[in-house]
Amino acid sequence: MSKKSQQQVVVKEAAEKVSPEEYQKFINQLKLETIFLSAVKFEKVADAHLRDLRGAIIDLPKPQGNFINSKDPKKVFATLTYKATIIDEDDKSLLDAEIAYTAEFSYETTQFDKYNFSIFFDLSLLHMMHPYFRRSLDQLISESYMGHFIMPLLKMQIEKEPSEEE
């Protein structure tokens, strides 16, 4: 089973195991302390900055996430690892980057488990951390003399349940 399929299964399980009320209670007791860059791996083809990049694209798969709970003090660290590849028109990789950001949260009563983390990952964490990743990747590309790429925004879709009036 692929990682994407595994993640979809966990999210589906989480939706069945964690009620909206339980999740809201969980969210309300979390407090964001800080977000910090935790890892950068970067490799660029030596002459990439000399190539015609007009047809190049950026491949950005969905980031991977994990968490570590700490009971004393009551902290949880949620890390997202983003991978990005710039590919030229000939399907050659010009740049590979892996950037990880970690968010530190304090909590009052309930720490992360795989269910509330998978929901938090999809509903909040991706959207919270994406601007940091965009900035870091843009900076790496710029400092590599590769020009600028328009980094995609993250789309957020919230489904509203139909009301009885509709």
Image (tube, grey):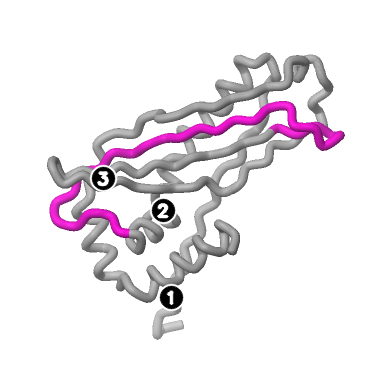
Q: Which residue is mark 2?
A: 121
Does 2 sit above or below residue 91?
below
Q: Residue at x 68, y 27 (%)?
A: 95
Q: Nearer the viewer, mark 2 or mark 3?
A: 3
What SS does tag 3 mark? strand
User: Left or right: 103 with respect to 107?
Assistant: right
Q: Position of residue 52 (x, y in %)?
A: 83, 22
Does 109 sit above or below residue 13?
above
Q: Is residue 92 magenta?
A: yes
Q: Residue at x 62, y 18 (%)?
A: 142
The stretch of residues the image draws in magenta is 86-113
Q: Which residue is mark 1?
A: 161
Q: Where on the picture, by quarter, is residue 149?
A: top right
Q: Amino acid at mark 2?
A: Phe
| Total marks in image | 3
Q: Nearer the viewer, mark 1 or mark 2?
A: 2
Q: Which residue is mark 3?
A: 76
Q: CA distance from mark 1 to mark 2?
A: 21 Å
Residue extending furthest toward the front: 1
Q: Are marks 3 and 1 in contact (CB under 8 Å)?
A: no
